[in-house]
Image (cartoon, rainbow, N blue to C red):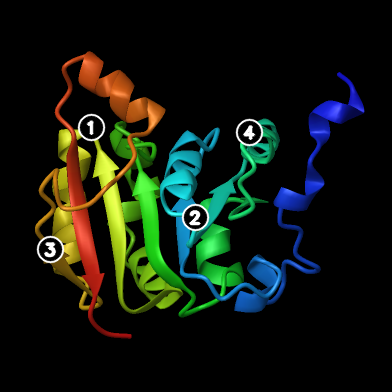
Amino acid sequence: MSTAEFEPFHLELYPETLFQRLREEELFDGSNAPLEIDLGCGDGRFLQSMAEKFPQRNFLGVERLLGRVRKVCRRSDRAGLGNIRALRLETTYAVEWLLPKGSAERVHLLFPDPWPKKKHHKRRLMAQPKFLKSVADLLKEGGEFLFKTDHEEYFEVAKEAVEECPCFEVLDWPEDAFYYAETDFERQWKEAGRHIQGLRLLKVSD
């Protein structure tokens, strides 16, 4: 594999340290444009679609797999999208310990692993009160957290967890509410006839 495949580095976010929170101005070289964060962004197709539609906003993708992060950067650079950055890090650590509080207008969690086996249920992000509170901490007052899944049982668990979290209010989310790009998983599941469900959550308190 040639070194050219690892470029461009300028779209990948490299924190100086992983042991203190980033400052908001470190994410996009001082840009104060509205920020959206995609947790577990995969190969970045959702990010790219959103960044193309909303060039006045910044989009940060968090992804733990190096190959996917590099793909996000390459595709974004080829498309001339300077409003995308990618952070290679595990989602929970990024949310709870690294990303700046009160920085995001929106946080997206789209089709995370539903961990269907009972012994793995404790790994479900949307079932963890600490994770939900940490996401709320990332949002500006009035910001939104958007979640989608094709897994019916996980969706019900997520709804129950959100009902017990005082940080969020559930909003209606009709399909025509606003432009919202589809992920590859969403297209795949729809073609397979699976039912997609989502939660649109408004931050109401710290």
Circles 1 and 3: CB atoms closer than 8 Å: no
Q: Is residue 23 visible?
A: no
Residue 203 appears in which quarter of the rendering?
Answer: bottom left
Quarter containing the N terminus: top right
For marks 4 and 3 on the same chain, the one whose residue lies earlier in the sequence: 4
The total of numbered circles placed on residues is 4
Mark 3 = which residue? 171
Q: Secondary structure at mark 2?
A: loop
In the rendering, at what x and y percent does residue 145 appear? 31, 61
Residue 200 appears in which quarter of the rendering?
Answer: bottom left
Q: Residue furthest bottom?
A: 206
Q: In the rendered structure, find residue 150 and report the number of the disc placed on it.
A: 1
For marks 2 and 4 on the same chain, the one whose residue lies earlier in the sequence: 2
In the rendering, at what x and y percent does residue 43 appear? 55, 33
Q: Secondary structure at mark 4?
A: helix
| Residue at the image point whose x is 51% and y is 57% from the top | 92
Q: Secondary structure at mark 1?
A: loop
Say few, some or many: other residues with alpha carbon within 10 Å of mark 1 (under 14 / 14 to 19 / 20 or more): many
Asked whether 122 or 124 is in front, the reply is 124
Circles 4 and 3: CB atoms closer than 8 Å: no
User: Could you give the CA–CA distance between mark 2 and mark 1, rounded to whole angstroms?
Assistant: 29 Å
Q: Residue furthest right?
A: 3
Q: In the rendered structure, find residue 75 and report the number of the disc placed on it.
A: 4
Query: Is 97 placed left or right of 17 in the picture?
Result: left
Circles 2 and 4: CB atoms closer than 8 Å: no
